[in-house]
Image (cartoon, rainbow, N blue to C red):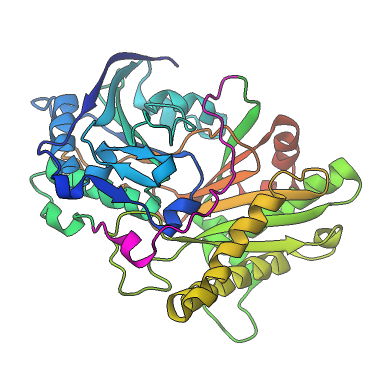
Amino acid sequence: MKVKNYLSKLVKPSKPTSTIDRYFKISMFDELAPSMNIPIILYYSSPPKDLNICDHLEHTLSKTLSEFYPLAGRYIRKLTLIDCNDQGVSYVLGKANVRLSEILSLGRELDPDALNGFLPCEIGEVDEVDDPMLSVKVTTFECGGFAIGMCFSHRISDMGATCNFIHSWAARSNAAKPKHEEYSPILNLATFFPPRGLPELDVRIPRSSVGVKTKARRFVFKAEAISAMRESVGFDENGARRPSKVQLVFALLWKALVHVDQVNNGQSKASFLIQAVGLRDKVAGELPTNSCGNFLGMAPSRLRPGEGEKIPFRDFFKILRESVSKTVRDCTKMLTCGEEGYEALIDPYLEANRNMFTNNVVSFYFFTSWCKFSYYEADFGCGKPVWVSTAMLPTQNLVILMDDHEGDGVEAWVHLDEKRMKQLEQDSGIKAYAI
């Protein structure tokens, strides 16, 4: 598959940003975000014949940016702010020499690396003074279908903010959709959580993926597999909520990765796993879903050397679920206890930075879930997406979970080196549940 770009330009807001809003301060949560773009790709069937989809999307993008004006600016790292200078977002048009159905039918043969051709830029092209806060690429297929690939700077966007922008843009593009005003961004997170000069999460995404030896693989867990995992875990002793599909798949993957570690080293090393936890709907009910920026906590889970070889799948699940619950409690404390509570939020970030590159002592993994976000509802006037994906990120020991098209299954996008990926594929737990 080849994608040929034939146009690249900057799209500016349809209305100039006022001088009052010229400088946008990022929040404490934005400070802690990793230096990377969030890559998401939406795939659509053919638009109506009387609609030039590329021009239509460019026109409505410009209108949407008038409200989401920080995305049209540039980040000034030294000042921890965005210069909302209306420089614009990158807008790229491309053509692919395949039909959309050919990609959708690949199944296990899908190579996530090939999907990067649908993205407008590299994952690591971010946080420098010339890097756009948002880049968009519209790729048309031979069948008439198209893909919208987007890279959102993590400096100002988490998946909640990303989906809010996508829905605002879609509402402006679709006359049959509700008014776009319900998605208008609220740009005041820094007022409540001002920047504190904190270190960024040191994920170290390279600016270029050339030469990177990461292997990415998509593992699909359908609803039937999720149900089987629930039965094997059961409800806890107190009859609490049923196990979530996210924690089940995370637990299965962590257990398998510990086994891979054991195979390669004779005994599994200490294992340190960080889960990103969205906080909008967990600790601040008054925080609107259309607040712009990051609002995430980090839930750490730990295993001592050899410990993971002795515990069952159910215990992996319980460790992960209890870690998330503790993080939610700690972040609630931050909101109610002032300065004392901030340590509960910041300490996991600092611990992650200490453990991230101690490969000889600790196995470090970063897990994040994009499930339960409404990207499958984004209708730009051509119907809802037939598929939504991410792509290959040039880093290892990373897992991204996404809903499948039906909504009750999970797609796990796993990033490892080639040797460990082959071993993971042969793990008995993975083979039992993934397709």
- Identified at 34% across, 60% down, the residue is 190
Q: Check the image and report above or below for 72 versus 103.
A: below
Q: Is residue 214 left or right of residue 61?
A: right
- Most foreground residue, 364 or 28: 28
Farthest-out residue, front: 79
Where is residue 98 shown, x and y percent of the image?
38, 18
Where is residue 237 shown, x and y percent of the image?
65, 84
- Identified at 36% across, 39% down, the residue is 75
Classify the position of the N terminus by image quarter: top left
Where is residue 419 shown, x and y percent of the image?
75, 32
Q: Check the image and report above or below for 94 versus 158.
A: above
Secondary structure, magenta segment, majority class: loop
Q: Is residue 20 left or right of residue 281?
A: left
Q: Check the image and report above or below for 273 versus 91.
A: below
Where is residue 364 shown, x and y percent of the image?
70, 49
- Identified at 24% across, 59% down, the residue is 186
- Identified at 76% across, 38% down, the residue is 423
Q: Check the image and report above or below for 299 versus 406.
A: below
- Most foreground residue, 27 or 223: 27
Q: How many marks?
A: 0
Q: Which residues are magenta?
A: 186-210
